[in-house]
Image (cartoon, helix red, strand yellow):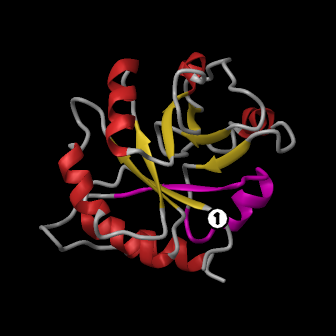
Amino acid sequence: MLQYPVYVRSISNLSDARYCAGMGVELLGFCFDETNGISISEFEAIKGWLSGVKIVAEFYTSNLDFIKRTIENIKPDFVHISVENTNWEDEISVPIIFDFNIDNKIPIFPKLGSLVVLSCSNDGQNIYDNHLLIKELVFDNQYKLFFGYGITAENIKTHISTYKAFGIALKGGSEIAPGLKSFDELADILEAIEV
């Protein structure tokens, strides 16, 4: 069991999905973009091996019709879209997790109480330079923030407490070969927050 909610994004293989589910990760994200996402059939093959997790359909496209069709087909628990698309809140039939890339400094905020993943293009090289912006985004816990960059086993608890994060967001990786995967970095972080 993990101390905080964990969302692992960009899962593309069964090894990541089963490992994360076995470690108690709450949310598993799969990218369904038209150009670089996984297919619905690939997803269904992975999903058949999973139980006890919530599925997040991730989209980085601006094609709302494609997103709605995919949601109808796979019936995820959540949808992950860019914070730029807050105007889609009434168009999407499942709860939304918004991606807020701190590098863009976009002055667009979703409704208070929304789930937000805080991401960063350079994976947190300037994390402390962004401290005030992060604090502003959290608004004293008026957003449920998944801290999603610069996380290590050594700093995870500090980030959770400093930024009043609801949980953490990590990324899946590629397999070395089908069924062969190193989980060292992911395992270190998850083991650091095991109860």
Residue sitting at 80 percent across and 32 percent down? 136
Task: Kindly identify the amino acid type of the residue bearing the numbered disc 1.
Answer: Ile
- Neighbourhood count class around disc 1 (C-alpha, 10 Å): few under 14, some 14–19, many 20 upward: some
Residue ID at (41%, 44%): 75
Please state the total of marks drawn on the protein image: 1
* Span colored in magenta: 152-172
Q: Residue furthest right?
A: 140
Report x, y in % for residue 4: 67, 66
The residue positioned 52% from the left and 38% from the top of the image is 120
Q: Is residue 55 magenta?
A: no
Q: Is residue 122 above or below residue 46?
A: above
Q: Quadrant of the C terminus?
A: bottom right
Reply above or below: 112 against 118: above
* Image position, residue 98 (x, y; %): 57, 34
| 173 lies above or below 120 | below
Q: Residue 142: x percent and y percent? A: 82, 39
Question: Mark 1 sits on what residue?
Answer: 156
The magenta stretch spans residue 158: yes
Which image quarter holds the N terminus?
A: bottom right
Q: Is residue 84 left or right of residue 22?
A: right
Depth check, front residue: 43 or 98: 43
Q: Quadrant of residue 172?
A: bottom left
The answer to whether residue 148 of the structure is visible from this angle is: yes
Q: Is residue 51 left or right of residue 195?
A: left
Confirm whether residue 63 shows in the render: no
Residue 51 at what x, y percent from top left? 42, 70
Secondary structure found at label 1:
helix
Nearer the observer, 85 or 168: 85
From the viewer's perspective, tell me whether residue 87 is left or right of residue 58: right
Furthest-left residue in view? 177
User: Which one is nearer the viewer's eye here, 155 or 75?
Assistant: 75
The image shows residue 39, relative to residue 44, as above or below, that is above
